[in-house]
Amino acid sequence: MRYQNQKDAKAWRNLTYILAWALGGYAVISLFVHMLPWLEIEKTYVIIQLAISKVLIFTVISYMLYLSTKNFLSHKHNAVVNRHRQNALQTYTTLVEASGDSQTRDAVLLHAAACIYSPQPTGYSAGSGNSQGATSVIELMSKPLGGGD
């Protein structure tokens, strides 16, 4: 899944570049479209129609650029989060094999689960990525491991 998000992010990035160039090109071309000799710009109706069509086309291309940028950032965010989760899972298995203590194993499992399943901030998406996991290993080690009273 991680690699699919990277491929999709690359495709959306390329489309974003294309749309940005198209928007810039259209902005430059629209500055000179009124100079076309076959356009009768003496009539008010033609002037209004030309102005509205220029604004409408510019707005549509701008919105498409906004959506492609948003999709690029979303796929990039997912690729980073998936890589982070994969690293957390690989690190967990290494740490569990290295420790023989069951209490340490449980503490590592809690941190790995918090890392894998909680939302992670990556800088590609807006919002807070506050994790709901434990804040430190000391806090985890101080908790009783028993099932109850």
Image (cartoon, grey):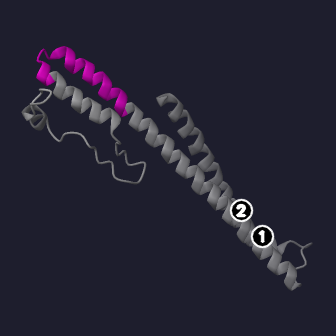
| Disc 1 element | helix
Task: Mark 1 and mark 2 in contact? Answer it, CB < 8 Å.
Answer: no
Q: Secondary structure at mark 2?
A: helix
Image mark for residue 26: 2
- Residue type at numbered disc 2: Tyr
Q: x, y (%) of residue 98?
A: 17, 15
What is the C-alpha distance between the residues marked 1 and 2?
Answer: 12 Å
Mark number, residue 53:
1
User: Magenta stretch: residue 101 in it?
Assistant: yes
Q: Nearer the viewer, residue 80 or 129?
A: 129
Q: Earlier in the sequence, mark 1 or mark 2?
A: 2
What's the amino acid at mark 1? Ser
Q: Residue at x 86, y 78 (%)?
A: 46
Q: Which residues are magenta?
A: 84-104
Q: Residues within 10 Å of mark 2 (few under 14, many from 20)?
A: some
In the picture, measured across the screen, residue 132 lies left or right of residue 45, that is left
Could you tell me which residue is drawn at 19 percent across and 27 percent down? 108
